[in-house]
Image (spheres, rainbow, N blue to C red):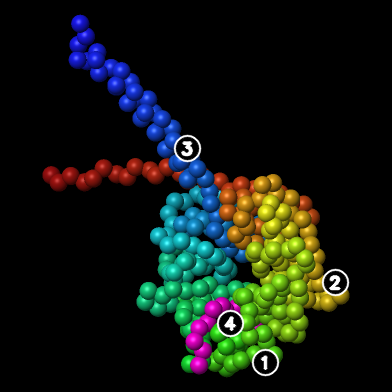
């Protein structure tokens, strides 16, 4: 005669197997979720010292030995999508939120208005666009530079360098002149974006706003990330798994474009590019890899995490 405990044993075994199967699935999902994901690459004078940023504010800093490592927990509640830098301070742009500043390992939101939705500008000077207002973020607290003229309905992009500030509006490109934005003569009215105060993106190429010359991308090139370096434009083309580095040298009108294949196996979406004056280039991919070119040789490095376990604090005080 079977007891009640004996009768329940088969059902108990089935339940245990089901729970173990669920645990395996969850463990696999957790492992995938824990894999590093990158959203942007903050520039530095030395491309090897660029800082990789995750979408939740994860910070992967160069360790000085050729790797990028996350050593501190913490982040932000918003989704970060772009990054730049002022000296050693990283500034990140968030989706539908104000920009954030990373200093001494901690993120703080920059005050550019109540519930502001800011767009981080492009170029070597750090500015942000909030509605129709442009703020400088490169010297102390955010400072409003100017508003677009009242006749402008929308401002869609801003680019800047120490030499000037340009905005792209529904009425064309405008430059900051003596505290006010004025139209740029002969500039294209419609652009896809700005790379700085000198370079604008148009269909199939870019425009040099200094000469108003259009430089077309080569056939088969699909540029997904760009940066500027002096008078040059550095872009990354990605067509499926094929990645190329595209350099436009404004000082060489007869042969301004140089294409270079980037040897990356199973390339994932590119999220950032940084270049320096010594021809080093760093290209970050969403899956946590960074391709670094140094002395003409490419090396692919995967960022990693080395976050120390939190130390237990002192026991709570007891009243006597």
Question: Taking 272 as reference, is 116 above or below it?
Answer: below
Q: CA distance from mark 4 to mark 2?
A: 29 Å
Residue 206, above or below 90 = below
Residue 275 in view:
no
Q: Secondary structure at mark 4?
A: strand
Is-magenta flag for residue 158?
A: yes
Identify the image quadrant of the N terminus: top left
Q: Residues within 10 Å of mark 4 (few under 14, many from 20)?
A: many
On screen, residue 283 above or below 257? above
Locate the C terminus by quadrant. top left
Residue, disc 4: 168
- Marks 1 and 2, how far apart at CA: 27 Å
Residue sitting at x 25%, y 18%: 8
First-in-chain label (4 vs 3): 3
Secondary structure beneath dot 3 equals helix
Label 2: element kind? loop
The range drawn in magenta is 151-163
- Real-space Cα separation, disc 1 to disc 3, in angstroms: 58 Å
Q: Spatial distance from mark 2 to mark 3, Cα to Cα?
A: 51 Å
Residue 221 location in percent, x, y? 73, 63
Q: Please indicate whether residue 22 sits to the left or right of residue 86 in the image.
A: left
Q: Which residue is mark 1?
A: 185
Mark sitting earlier along the chain (1/4): 4
- On the image, numbered disc 2 is attached to which residue? 255
Q: Residues within 10 Å of mark 3 (few under 14, many from 20)?
A: few
Circles 1 and 3: CB atoms closer than 8 Å: no
Sequence-first disc among 1 and 2: 1
Q: Local crowd at mark 1 within 10 Å, few (<14), some, or many (≥20)?
A: few
Mark 3 lies on residue:
28
Give neighbour class at mark 2: few <14, some 14-19, many 20+ (Cα, 10 Å): few
Mark earlier in primary sequence (2, 3): 3
> In the rendered structure, does residue 43 fall within the stretch colored magenta?
no
């Amino acid at each position: 005669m079977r007891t009640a405990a004996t009768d329940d044993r088969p059902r108990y075994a089935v339940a245990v197997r089901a729970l173990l199967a669920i645990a395996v699935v969850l463990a696999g999902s957790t492992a995938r979720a824990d894999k590093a994901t990158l959203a942007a690459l903050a520039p530095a004078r030395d491309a090897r010292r660029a800082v990789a940023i995750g979408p939740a504010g994860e910070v992967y800093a160069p360790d000085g030995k050729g790797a990028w490592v996350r050593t501190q927990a913490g982040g932000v509640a918003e989704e970060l999508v772009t990054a730049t830098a002022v000296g050693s301070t990283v500034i990140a742009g968030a989706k539908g939120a104000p920009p954030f500043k990373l200093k001494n390992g901690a993120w703080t939101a920059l005050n550019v208005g109540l519930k502001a939705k800011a767009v981080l500008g492009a170029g070597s000077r750090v500015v942000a666009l909030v509605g129709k207002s442009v703020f400088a973020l490169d010297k102390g607290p955010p400072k409003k530079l100017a508003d677009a003229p009242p006749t402008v309905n929308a401002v869609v992009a801003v680019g800047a360098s120490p030499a000037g500030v340009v905005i792209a509006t529904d009425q064309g490109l405008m430059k900051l002149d003596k505290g006010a934005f004025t139209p740029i003569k002969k500039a294209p009215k419609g652009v896809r974006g700005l790379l700085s105060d000198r370079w604008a993106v148009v269909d199939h190429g870019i425009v040099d706003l200094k000469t108003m010359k259009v430089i077309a991308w080569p056939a088969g090139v699909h540029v997904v990330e760009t940066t500027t370096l002096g008078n040059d434009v550095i872009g990354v083309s990605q067509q499926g798994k094929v990645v190329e580095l595209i350099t436009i040298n404004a000082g060489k009108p007869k042969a301004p474009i140089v294409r270079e294949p980037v040897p990356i196996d199973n390339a994932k979406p590119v999220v950032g590019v940084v270049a320096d004056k010594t021809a080093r280039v760093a290209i970050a991919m969403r899956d946590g890899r960074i391709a670094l070119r140094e002395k003409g040789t490419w090396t692919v490095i995967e960022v990693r995490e080395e976050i120390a376990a939190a130390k237990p604090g002192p026991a709570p005080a007891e009243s006597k």
